[in-house]
Amino acid sequence: MSRSEMLSPSFLGRLPNAVRRPDYDRGSLAVGMAHIGVGAFHRCHQAEYTDDLLGQRFDRWGVVGINIRNPLLADTLGRQSGLYTRLLREDGKVDARVIGCMLSVVDSQASPQPALEVLASPEFDVITLTVTEKGYCHRPASGDLNTDLPDVVHDMSNPGTPRSLPGLLVRALELRRLSHGRPVTIISCDNIPANGAILGNVVRSLAQRRGDDLLSWIEANAAFPSTMVDRIVPATSAADMEALQQDYGYRDNAVVVGEPFRQWVIENRFAGRVPQWDLAGATVVDDVTPFEHMKMRILNAAQSTLSYLGVLAGHAHTSDDMADPLLAGFVRRMLLEESVPTLQPVPGMPAEDYVEQSLARLRNTAIRHRNHQIATDGSQKIVQRILNPIRERLQRGQGIALLSVPVAAWMTYLICSSARFGKKWVVEDPYGDRVAAIAERVGHDVTALVAEILAIDTIFDPELAASAVFRDAIVASLNGFLSDDPLACVRHICGLAPDRS
Ligand code: CS2
């Protein structure tokens, strides 16, 4: 076998035995679903469920992948006819498999037309999407459509050539209504709370402005179930591709690497035909909220907290953070003492067990999840992971000494990207420039820094921002994080003696 041979349909029969291939005849698979945002998470999560389902009950559920943002997939997935390898790694163990359900990929970054042709076609009964928090164009604090965003402003006056995701879906629904009228289920698989409710909300909100009865057609013919999705899948690195070539002797530019754990909970709200993913291990429920809160307030809250504290401690990956007793100990305490009491019960999964299971997942040394990757878009993540539990605790008169630490750590991360604070790293966050500008102007006056950042009401709702308990806790931690010994405040909160080494 040539070392440079690339994964392709003709190569499937020659895959090494250690790599599992699709258990169905890919040649007779017809398309029935479109997925917008074919990133690593989709390829390693939902597509695996679809492949499992096709292996058990073969049906017309081939997927057309659509990318409306970078990266271009023509040279990766496109050249491999949608095929890719997914590796599950846990410490020294690995499970390798080629996923076959994606039959083609459509790049629709330059123009919405290629995406619209797919989304409006009667062949597609289901549209799924992973477009990250920003893609929804909502205000994180309220879930409403953010009509100040330039792409949304554009789509309100140019509905035929949409630039935003909500605009694209509204146009696709309008075309469906005009051409064939078939119902469609649109399933958000992004890790944002009430993702289906928010998606339905932003779509309806834009549709309403079309001035005809599109909105009532959508109400009757489209469904937007909420889902809780879970598997840790870091961005694929060049080292992952090299390792695949080394270990299995072929090249795959679209390989994805994830952990073995996976979970998918889907709200029972469908329009027309949908795949029976429950046969492949997904859970269909009437209300996703308790599952979603547990995941976001425990696993994701731990990840975000570790990412900011880990950067301050000079660590690179989550598993490095978890190997640091101070950080691991702080996070366990924060989750057990302050996050867990805000959760509703989830059948079959006591919250304390979920904490331990989550922390064990984060210790997996084979998953190279970079702190800076998790720290990305923190303004969109901290609301559901940290701020909502804080708000609920404050309403009940409960303490927030631990949960306020990651909020201050997130602020520190953004503040330290400004020139005045040494440009310590490059931040990717829609509010990064705004916070950096505040830092440039205000400098080291921590009380003023906190007041100005808390005044960003699309992140901090005004009632929370007005809480003196919250504000004082943030000021205390931020003072510590901006000092010469950033982690001293965490040691202090944990009741540990100052480090004299
Ligand atoms: C991570 C998530 O980058 C992040 O924000 O916290 O992508 C996390 O790995 C997934 O939600 C796990 O399901």
Image (spheres, helix red, strand yellow):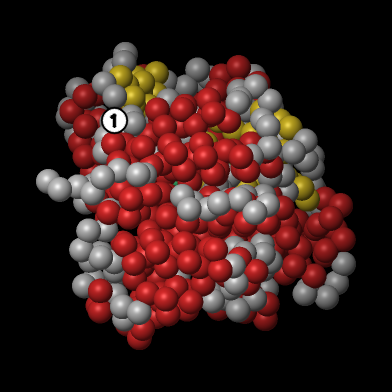
Residue 16 quadrant:
top left
Whole-percent x and y of residue 229? 56, 38
Whole-percent x and y of residue 357? 47, 27
Q: Which residue lies under the disc numbered 1? A: 366
Q: What residue type is labelled 1?
A: Ala
Circle 1 Cα neighbour tier, 10 Å, few/some/many (<14 / 14–19 / ≥20): some
The residue positioned 76% from the left and 63% from the top of the image is: 204
Whole-percent x and y of residue 387? 56, 57
Q: In the structure shown, which secondary structural element does the residue marked by tag 1 occupy?
A: loop
Q: Vertically, is 68 above or below 357? A: below
Q: Quick one: which residue is furthest to the bottom in this view?
A: 441
| Residue 107 visible, this orientation | no
Q: Is residue 229 left or right of residue 73?
A: right
Q: Quick one: which residue is furthest to the top in this view?
A: 17
Q: Which of 275 and 423 is in front in this view?
A: 423
| Residue 455 visible, this orientation | yes
Q: Does the residue labelled 1 lie within 8 Å of ligand 1?
A: no
Q: Is residue 248 left or right of residue 97?
A: left
Q: In which quarter of the image is the N terminus?
A: top left
Q: Vertically, is 423 above or below 401? A: below
Q: In this view, does 64 lie to the left or right of 172?
A: left
The residue positioned 42% from the left and 49% from the top of the image is: 304
Whole-percent x and y of residue 391? 62, 57
